[in-house]
Amino acid sequence: MKLLTAKEIKKIVIGVVLSDGHIDVKGQRFDFYSKEEEYAKYVYNVISQITGMYVTFKVKHDKRGYTGYRVLTRKHAYWKNLGGKFYNGRKEINIYTSKRIDAEALAHIWMCDGYLEHAKNHKLDKVQNVGWLCLEAFPAQELELLQRQMETMGIGSSLVRKPWGFGYRIRIGGESLQKMVSTVYPYILDCFKHKAILFYKTEKPVLMSLPSAKQYVEFYSCVEDIVRHPTKVGRT
């Protein structure tokens, strides 16, 4: 991994903490867990670049048969200072954190809490691509701050009610989904590439002028070509 600047590290940390990362402000420690070894090692390498930071990487075997990977740090003032920006009794999205979400930070939110749905219409033999940010841990007014920040990147979205957490999830579709995937694509790790593939039957609805469009757009002839974690199905 290249040597990162303090600003680059902070952008990545903001994205990670707003999703699967946790800061113990009182204990001044960082804790992160992922089922993806590649991603956990990436986070480990990023955090390790903070001056004076002691980081450990642990393999965790779940009783249900899952294997996960945990990144933890010892006490460090970095987490006390930054943690105060995230926590007010609970983790929150606020003006400070939302204004600092850029393409790279959004990519980490997407890798951790994003979900790409390919809704199949077998009758019409078509697929609708829908992106979801599963951030029900935050109330609607906080998600709206994130939505407004995404709008500055040209990404529109809506809030959809869900029966858990604070009751809302962010939905992204149409051209906005293409813009979102194009925005985050350069930062998506290989283990999460399945979250950055959009399927279309023709080029008509596709914004091929967007950066990386040739990498994240796949064309299909039949909806049965599309699987949950797609590989190449052939371009037309």
Image (cartoon, helix red, strand yellow):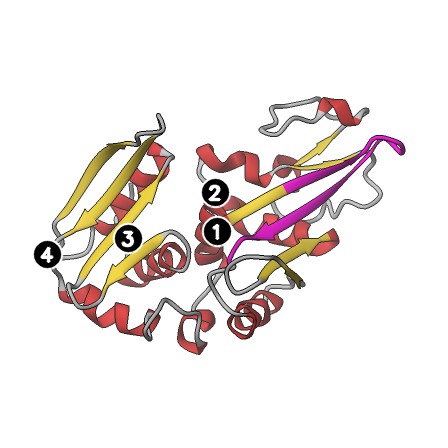
**For the residue labelled by badge 4, is the local secondary structure a helix, a strand or a loop?**
loop
Mark 3 surroundings: few (<14), some (14-19) or many (≥20) residues within 10 A: few
Confirm whether residue 80 shows in the render: yes
Determine which residue is flagged by label 1. Answer: 107
Determine which residue is flagged by label 4. Answer: 52
**What is the C-alpha distance between the residues marked 3 and 1?**
17 Å
Say which label, 3 or 4, has the lower sequence index: 3
Determine which residue is flagged by label 2. Answer: 188
Say which label, 2 or 4, has the lower sequence index: 4
CB atoms of marks 4 and 1 within 8 Å: no
**What is the C-alpha distance between the residues marked 2 and 4?**
28 Å
CB atoms of marks 3 and 2 within 8 Å: no
Q: Mark 3 or mark 1, which is nearer to you?
A: 1
Determine which residue is flagged by label 3. Answer: 4
**What is the C-alpha distance between the residues marked 4 and 1?**
27 Å
Say which label, 4 or 1, has the lower sequence index: 4
Q: Quadrant location of the C terminus?
A: top right
Q: Which residue is drawn at 22% across and 72% down?
A: 81
Three-letter amino acid code at disc 4?
Gly
Q: Which of 147 and 31 is in front in this view?
A: 31
CB atoms of marks 3 and 1 within 8 Å: no
Position of residue 204 relative to residue 135, above or below, is: above
Task: Label the magenta part by its dominant secondary structure.
Answer: strand
Q: What stretch is highlighted in magenta?
A: 117-135
Say which label, 3 or 1, has the lower sequence index: 3
Mark 2 surroundings: few (<14), some (14-19) or many (≥20) residues within 10 A: some
Say which label, 1 or 2, has the lower sequence index: 1
Confirm whether residue 236 shows in the render: no
Answer whether residue 118 is magenta in the image. yes
**Position of residue 128 measured from the top left corner of the image (x, y, whole percent):** 76, 42
Q: Mark 3 or mark 2, which is nearer to you?
A: 2
**Position of residue 230 measured from the top left corner of the image (x, y, whole percent):** 61, 27
